[in-house]
Image (spheres, rainbow, N blue to C red):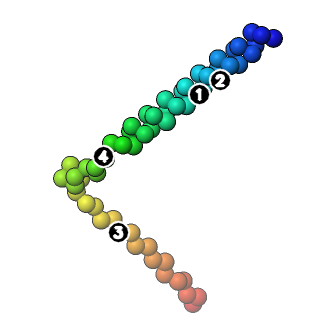
Amino acid sequence: MERSKLIAILTGAISVILAIAYLILVQLLDYRDMKPAPISQFDQTPAIISYFWQVDKMTEM
């Protein structure tokens, strides 16, 4: 029974350490000043797509 308690405490400690490391990593990444890419970086030309569909009613003769 003593060994299983030691393993449970050890895995719990590892879990807490990983959680704290994850929170620190997220804070460091969030701290960076993220700026959007300039529009000149995009080499795409704008495209206009038009779609028109018309159904004529059939009349009885």
Q: How far across and down, in percent of the image, does residue 10 sit?
A: 64, 17
Q: Earlier in the sequence, mark 2 or mark 4?
A: 2
| Quadrant that contains the N terminus | top right
Mark 1–mark 3 Cα distance, whole angstroms, equals 56 Å
Q: Earlier in the sequence, mark 1 or mark 3?
A: 1
Q: Amino acid at mark 3?
A: Ser
| Residue linked to disc 3 | 50
Q: Which mark is residue 33?
A: 4
Q: Earlier in the sequence, mark 2 or mark 3?
A: 2
| Residue linked to disc 1 | 16
Secondary structure state at the residue bearing disc 2: helix
Q: Are marks 1 and 2 in contact (CB under 8 Å)?
A: yes
Q: Amino acid at mark 4?
A: Asp
Q: Which mark is residue 12?
A: 2
Q: Are marks 3 and 4 in contact (CB under 8 Å)?
A: no
Secondary structure state at the residue bearing disc 3: loop
Q: Which mark is residue 39?
A: none
Q: Is residue 21 visible in this depiction of the protein? A: yes
